Image: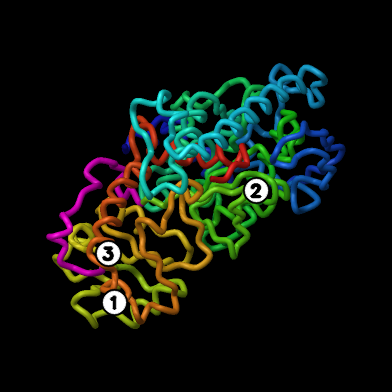
Amino acid sequence: MAYFCRKHSNVIAIAIASLALVSVVVLTKNSVNGFSWFHFFSSQRGWTGITNLGTTSSSSAFMTDQGKRKTLINGGKVSKEKYVLAGGGRRSDAKLKRVEAGLAMARTLIREAAEDNNCTSSLHDDLDYIPRGYIYRNACAFHRSYVLMEKMFKIFVYEEGEPPLFHYGTCKDIYSMEGVFLSFMETNTKFRTSNPDEAHVYFLPFSVVMIIEHLFHPVIRDKAVLERTVSDYVRIISHKYLYWNRSLGADHFMLSCHDWGPRATWYVRQLYYNSIRVLCNANTSEHFNPKKDASFPEINLKTGEITGLTGGSPPSNRTVLAFFAGKMHGKIRPALLQHWMGKDEDVQVYETLPQGISYHEMMKKSRYCICPSGHEVASPRIAEAIYAECVPVLISQHYIFPFSDVLDWDSFTVQVPVTEIPDLKNILEAIPEDQYSRMQERVKQVQRHFLVNNPPERYDVFHMIIHSIWLRRLNVRF
């Protein structure tokens, strides 16, 4: 796993060295005049008849940190041989119509599968894994959609930009999934196309984690580095290609697991309102829109390794009713720690684990693993609980759970309102043994959808993220 992010190591070293040599940041203003918006072919995402919404930035001008960022996004230079003329005429319209016709066919097939309780229409397409059981909202529709995704879905990744800010991310620690996805999109050719005319969606490959790491000054704390970097990137690709303007960004997506992932989209109006935002921090109170945005899991790959992360004791050997260990931050954890820390042998809650006690071993011998939100709604404990085959107890507000289009989270988790934290033990003890056994078995079943594999394997977390994007492009809900 650790080698995921090593392929750009030489380029990154040169780029970072270049950053270190720059002592003066030159700010230049680039006015955005003459943007042409194109009438978009009718589709179910509602792009028909969209009119000019103004500039692609929330500000009236784009600010360019030439010393640090200009070389990393090709300095805004557009080569004539790669320039795609906007307004491609009838030929461009015909290509778009073919793409939309394929999507319309996929919607029809998925709708038919949703009404087929025996999944007979899709069994012959797949001899590997057939989704079944209560963990799925509609197993037949999911299976049909997934198979069609594998056959049809094409993603165009803009090549503009250089590591470490683009096409690269860290593949360990709490934001690892951002780097893992970027790495797989660079190396996995299954869904990637070099022909933008056949693409269903377009990926903006910037890394919020790396922008913050390399451009954000810990003393000055100028968050505008996000605005300048992201706005400049959208400006360049929207001038160079017709695709952003054609849909006002609605068939484009970005992905981030950083807490500031949503913030990175604030500064480009169409990116915020129209584009597919794939976020760990899927907080509806911060304007995450589940109709167009997608939630994916926060997985803490502490060392970058992906082996040996799963498994746990059988139910008969799980001697702890409920377990949590974590820092007191956010609005929910203080209430949990106040009511339960050091007060009950069955509900073991710690801010800091005593010496000699293993966090992961505690999860593996607990029946329920408590997963409260912290500063942000997402928590890596959800994936950790699933890996340990421990039934997650979710305590959050305004959080859209990962892959919730497909997965029925009520079937394999316990969801406790914040107001009922004092009654947590009674809630868990009131769950009948047979119900607990069913939930625990479903946790083991759902585990495959949260696994990180290298190379990616069918139905794993990488493919589930891709499928979430596919559903947004289709505008289909099960």
Q: Distance of mark 3 from mark 1, alpha carbons? A: 11 Å
Residue type at numbered disc 3: Tyr
Residue 25, numbered circle: 2
Q: Distance of mark 1 from mark 2, alpha carbons? A: 56 Å
Residue 384, numbered circle: none
**In this view of the protein, which residue sits in the foreground, 231 or 431?**
431
The residue labelled by disc 1 is 425
In this picture, which residue range is highlighted in magenta?
300-322
Residue type at numbered disc 1: Lys
Helix, strand or loop at label 3? It is strand
Q: Is residue 96 above or below residue 201?
A: above
The residue that appears at 35% across and 82% down in the rendered structure is 338
**In this view of the protein, which residue sits in the foreground, 375 or 153?**
153
The residue labelled by disc 3 is 368
Q: Earlier in the sequence, mark 3 or mark 1?
A: 3
Q: Quadrant of residue 236?
A: top right
Could you tell me what secondary structure mostly forms the magenta stretch? Answer: loop
Whether residue 364 is visible to the viewer of this picture, yes or no, is yes
Residue type at numbered disc 2: Val
Q: Are marks 3 and 1 in contact (CB under 8 Å)?
A: no
